Amino acid sequence: MLYFLLSLYPLAAQETQESQGQNDEIDYDDFRDFGQSPKPITFIGTPETTQQMTVIEKETIEKSAARDIAALLEEEINMSVTRYGGYGNQTEMNLRGFDTERIAILIDGVPANSPRSGEFDINQIDLSNVERIEIIYGGSDTKYNVSGALGGVINIITIKKQNTGLNFGFTFSNTGYMPGEYNLRQAQGAIGKPEFIDLLDMQSLNLFLGHGGEKFSWRTSLFGNRAGNHYLYKDDYGFARRKISNEVLDGGGNVQLVFNLPKDASIMSDTKVYYARRNFPITMNSVGAALATDLIITENIVFAAPVAFHDTLATDASLTYQTSHTTYGVNISSNDHYLTAINRWNWYQSDKFTLRSGFDWRFLYINTDSPTEIEPVKTGNLGGLYVTAEYTFFKKLLLIGSVKGVTDTKQIKAVPKLGINWQIHDMFTLKNNYFRSFKFPDFDDLYYRSMDNTMVGNPNLRPEDGWGADLIGEFTLNEMFSFVSTAFFQYTTDSIHWMKSKGGRWSPENVSTACFTGVDFRPALNIKFNKRKLKSLKIAPNYQFQFSWLLNDDNDFKKAFRIPYMPTHIIGGIIDFAWETGSIMISAHYQSTRYADTTNKMPLDPHCIAHITINQKAGKNLTFFASLRNIFDVNYESFASYHMPGISLVCGVRGKFNFKKQEINNENE
């Protein structure tokens, strides 16, 4: 694979008079800018996707002062999020009714879901290093053509824009919780006194240094977090408690090297390291905890060429290796190794027709050290090959047909999709998609075995398979007002859920058919100001209705149970008021009743949380920010019996400095 990447270098470097003339006619909007300047490394993707898509830019990410990606998505796009506590704990995201295991998470276009569990540790991504985030709704992705995207795709682009010259920056923040009295042992215990150290509960620090040049650019960064998670909450009996035994210390860094080649081709090397040391309490109120550590090392090499072999051909390729070492308690550890290869090609046959093809492949090697493991070493392969054709009628009607063959080496399935993007008017676009959604079981679902044998995988699981459709209307008026409305329907046969048997053992089963339907309304008002140093006002409310059914032989649509942790109503939005040197952002998020089990006997009460964040520049290089989270001090459960923090205050400072070569020489003189 590496030889293949390097062999394309001379092809990208070929320049003839004929090719130079044809290059002027190629639409480079098809390439996703990785952010490197002045010659950006690119990543091939369909520019006009037929799916609903939201992009969160760097400015919005910084304004929010969110502690992680899940919090950012909850505030910005009203995503439903399930947490097992404060910072560093397991977090699940929900897109169109599907949880993280069924959403394709990408980092710089490369699949990042764990092949072992399907989950994604959001804490390994430092938001200070994120350039933008793309959220693509709906199953069977045709933008990046990755596998397993039942609910959609979240592409996290971490490559920073490098200004010419030397760049340096930092972000530091402190999170504090309101001290107060609390019960040590429910009603029987003594009263604990306020502990003012909780005002310094969490500190976060990010540092970066980089240099941007015409032929070569580099960037390195470090980040670290210390969190006590010592917040007050009310337990299931209504007594005030203080969270303990849930301390987290984590951090990491990365080094990015970008080599700019002739004809805008690029090679990038990106090395990431993440380490975490966490205390996990046995229960929410437990004073004892199990220690868990994680070490993740990732190396990613990307080659991108807007022109390869011929002026109508473009390609990109990536090779990613990841090793993960995890320990839990004193008896369980795991050493995992993943190798991911991706290659994509675009053929611009004419102004109206584009043919795209490519493949992705993941090899995994898992070695688990546990007293109960029968087969500690397991290997597997997952991958697929796709072909996508795009044809434009009348310059305003885009038809995209795609089929992807996916395999786990034991079976092969075809995943087709048909999408339409019709610009009926300059102000109105209609999108329509029909697709098959398909996902193989994760390794933990097949082979997991807990130390006490109470949780055991099921090697006889069948893949989750289904169909879906959506209809999207997009209205835009002079960049001042926009409105996106979506209606969707999707069902999945052989839906996998962990069930408890009569003997008390938990194991995953193909429970039933999971059916989803819903609508999504996203209006946005953007007002620009040109006087009194006022900049803009954005008002963006959002309402989502999504209903779900678990259907089996005994339950029809009238008797069916709701899918766990899926609210029927989500209401929220943001108000963002900006002036020349700062901004104030107010966000709110409401979720209706959810259920914690498949039989709907454990309801979780509705909750509404709100945040307010202020940013203020101090000179050219510094920005101070403060964020009041959960301003109404709402006590709520995100996961059953796991209570979330109340009101907290985040204060911090962000600095950015750029030194061009001429400025450095002047200083030396």
Image (tube, helix red, strand yellow):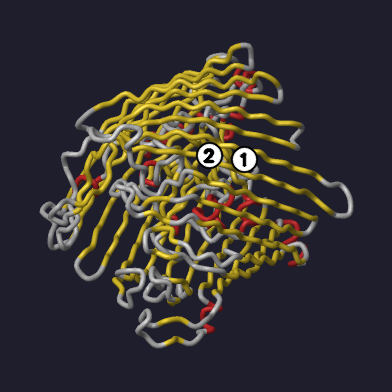
Residue drawn 44% across and 31% down? Answer: 141
Judge from the rendering whether residue 565 lies leftward or rightward of residue 441; answer left or right.
right
Residue picked out by circle 1: 39
Spot occupied by residue 134 in the image (x, y as percentages of width and height): 54, 41
Work out which residue is located at the far left of the displayed protein and give it.
374
Alpha-carbon span between mark 2 and mark 1: 8 Å
Name which residue type carries label 1.
Answer: Lys
Image quadrant for the C terminus? bottom right
Work out which residue is located at the far right of the displayed protein and give it.
531
Q: Residues within 10 Å of mark 2 (few under 14, many from 20)?
A: many
Disc 1 element: loop
Spot occupied by residue 651 in the image (x, y as percentages of width and height): 63, 70
On residue 165, the disc is: none
Work out which residue is located at the far front of the displayed protein and give it.
558
Residue drawn 22% across and 42% down? Answer: 509
Find out whether the residues at labels 2 and 1 contact each other: C-beta distance under 8 Å: yes
Disc 2 element: strand
Spot occupied by residue 76 in the image (x, y as percentages of width and height): 59, 49
Name which residue type carries label 2.
Answer: Ser
Residue picked out by circle 2: 266
Asked if residue 591 is positioned above or below residue 625 in the image, the reply reads above
Asked if residue 656 is positioned above or below residue 300 in the image, the reply reads below
Asked if residue 472 is positioned above or below residue 114 in the image, the reply reads above
Please say whether residue 286 is visible from this viewpoint.
yes
- Number of numbered discs on residues: 2
Residue drawn 57% across and 70% down? Answer: 648
